[in-house]
Amino acid sequence: MELLDILNDITTEARELNGEEKSFKLWMPKRVVFTADALEQAYGQKIYERIKELNLNIEIAKNNRITGLRGKDERETYRIAKNTLAIVNAPPSAFNLRPIPPSADWQFHLAEGCPAHCQYCYLAGSLSGPPAIRVFANLPQILENTIKFESLNQVTSFEASCYTDPLSLEHLTGGLAESINHFADRPNTHLRFVTKFDNVSGLLNLNHQGRTRFRSSLNADVIARKLEGGTPNVSVRIKALRKMALPRQQGGGGYPIGVVLAPIMPIPDWELHYSKLMDELELNLNFEIDLTFELITHRFTPGSRDILMEWYPNTSLDFSETNRAIKRNKFGGHKYVFVKELMKELKSFFEAEIARRFPNARILYWT
Ligand code: SF4
């Protein structure tokens, strides 16, 4: 099947899932740059062929440096960078995996950066420099390296979405399929990733052996519409989640799944808005299912707030310190979280809603 056929399929599927004529358009970068080193990798070549098939213009950076990402101010830099896909080799530090509690034992990266425009994006302040999307051409070596971090006698989990939304790039890179196939062959491992995207067609038929958990990042519809630019709407994401979880015999992917509710915000009438989201989930996940929840309230650091305010000066996101408490970390930094009483109220609401609707689901953590 040609790549364009697959993309057409995805488009049709998005239409059906959406129940709307207008489907979510997959991201196509305006600029694609390969470093010379990345092109020497077999996987780099695979990406090159995909991009060529999509008729996107390709530049080769001979000195292995990606330049031309800066504009005259932060907003222009943001615009240029968010339209740029760079295919590079991950540096040696990418092979020294770091733990990522409470989500997983270790994190590894297929890419850094994301084409969406969430006004609370947790990447602001975590990644330095212009927010271009960098995909790693030495992914097969990165995956091979994870073997060194496996424990002997217990399942070791690996998180793949700390610095990117991997499904947002899958049509351009195929990196998730590579990763799912890798972990399918490793007993005692568990791959996890989370996404706001819905183009799951290419993942449904992979022989994942139940070792990958597909998680969807969801929020109240009114929050997603206002703050999550460049992403499919919440209903479409829920339909994709259902599809990934449905048994193979019913045309689904048969994956264990998860819901990441984030960032939880006590907007006016929040109980009503979040109840609607839970109703829709309950309606769509109405079969026997291996389901987890992760519950993450909105938080920000002074640094991430400054960056986000530059990127989205007209945001309606509440960055005020009202209702906020300061949480310090061991490195002397701090972030703003909701005050204790509000946290308690939110927590009991979500725990009760989940227990009532999904008695067999596990809540992995609240934060
Ligand atoms: S989808 Fe995730 S990584 Fe991408 S912009 Fe939104 S919050 Fe950031």
Image (cartoon, grey):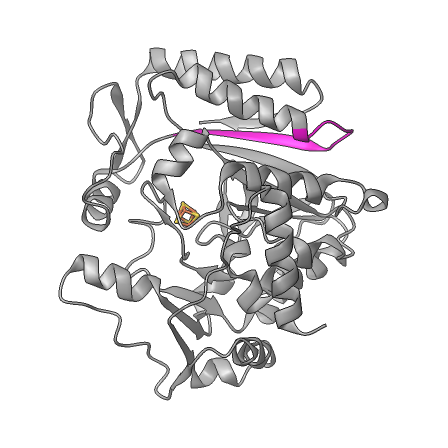
Q: Which residues are magenta?
A: 284-297
Q: Is residue 156 left or right of residue 124?
A: right
Residue at the spot x=46%, y=74% of the render? 89
Front one among 182 and 361: 361
**Which residue is depicted at the point 23% across and 40% down?**
305
- Closer to the camera in the image, 12 or 219: 12
Would you place residue 167 above or below residue 366 in this image?
below
Relative to 88, does residue 28 appear above or below in the rendering?
A: above
Kindly identify the residue that appears in the image at 60 percent across and 19 percent down: 354
Q: Quadrant of residue 362?
A: top right
Measured as percent of width and height from the top left, residue 355 is found at 63, 15
Residue at left 50%, top 84%?
Answer: 39
The image shows residue 292 at horizontal and vertical percentages of 63, 31
**In this picture, is 63 found above or below 259?**
below
Residue 321, compared with residue 257, is above or below; it is above
Was residue 288 drawn as part of the magenta stretch in this picture? yes
Which of the pair 123/14 is nearer the observer?
A: 14
Asked whether 274 or 343 is in front, the reply is 274
Residue ranking furthest to the right: 249
Residue 11 shown left or right of residue 100 in the figure: right
Residue 129 visible to the viewer: no
Examine the image and state in which quarter residue 69 appears.
bottom left
Quadrant of image for the N terminus: bottom right
Q: Quadrant of the C terminus?
A: top left
* Residue 226 placement (x, y as % from top left): 34, 37
